[in-house]
Image (spheres, helix red, strand yellow):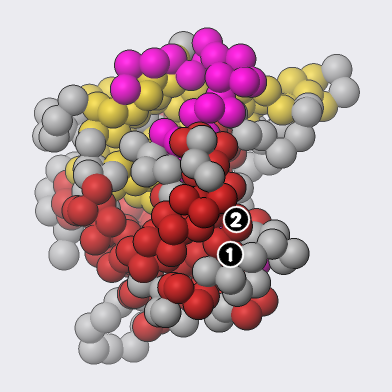
Amino acid sequence: MSTPVLQVEGLSVSARNGEREVTLVDRLSFDLAEGEILGLVGESGSGKTMACRGLMRLLPSPNLRVHGQAIRLAGENLLQLDENGMRAIRGRRLGMIFQNPSSHLDPLMRIGEQIGEGIRLHQGASKREARAQAIEVLRQVGVPDPLRRVDSYPHEFSGGMRQRAMIAVALACNPQVLIADEPTTALDVTVQAQILRLLLDLRDQRGLSIIMITHDLGVVAQTCDSIAVMYAGRLCEHGSKHALLARPRHPYTAGLIDCQPATGAGHALLRTIAGQPPLLDALPGGCRFNPRCLQPGSRCTESLPELQVMIEGPRVACHYPLAAAARP
């Protein structure tokens, strides 16, 4: 991989709860190379979306705050920018596809106007120039007859076409990094495959770096180069896709893989991870996964494990990492 286009160092997001401050994302650190697709995975509530909203400095409540050492985009520390500085970054250099396009596309604005809004803001284009660029972006994301559909409203698009329109809005100003939050949720299998293929093509054509938020390891296996696994707001394992899927070192990563339905013949009960993720304002002592872990040791309830680099390359936050033998 080339020099990282995005470097995240100790990113935290916390919420004020009365007199207490609850940490929702705890010291997240990773690098993203140019053209890399990173899969950010974990159960619902693990902090995936909140971490990426923290990256964007686009938090849904004034009670939330983002802090940390640095978020460097092509060397520029976003944590040192004021709101006007971040407004210039969002859309132009850092784009995001939100989970539900129906709730993030304005129902009263034509699709072309929504795509052109960012172009006019960041590039100073005229209304006519923005419309022409919007048509071209719709063509690039595979919307048929873009010359006509540019004047459509969101309700006139199917679910798959709305997702393509959302991608067009995010890509209109050619950002360096794209965050895709569950981009295939609620789409049928055929349309899911088309959207994933589109993102891969855009990566290849533009050299785009992508953070793919998902709970679907099948999506990760098809599209991603590397995987970062989150649990209860913390990064518990991070490494190449092939290494993590074949040789998971954290018990939680292994549990997520075992939860995936098998494609081979035979009939058996689907494996699950026992228990529930902890409440972030009532975390267990020591390792946050220890109440659900199948092989806890004496240190697991005593101290929180920090990320350590294994000999094979992945980073793992576990006192007793699993053996490195390849799994079937």
Q: Is residue 153 left or right of residue 268?
A: right
Is label 1 in a helix, a strand or a loop?
helix
Image quarter of residue 266: bottom left
Residue at 28% over, 68% down: 197
The residue to which callout 1 is attached is: 111
Q: In this view, does 177 lie above or below 71?
A: below
Q: Tell me, yes or no, if residue 112 can be seen here.
A: yes
Q: Is residue 291 left or right of residue 29?
A: right
**Between 104 and 259, the one nearer to me in the picture:** 104
Find residue 86 and report its horizontal and vertical position in percent: 56, 24
Query: Total marks drawn?
Result: 2
Find residue 87 and report its horizontal and vertical position in percent: 58, 28
**Between 155 and 317, the one nearer to me in the picture:** 155
The residue to which callout 2 is attached is: 114
Q: What amino acid type should be assigned to the residue bearing mark 1?
A: Ile
The stretch of residues the image draws in magenta is 74-102
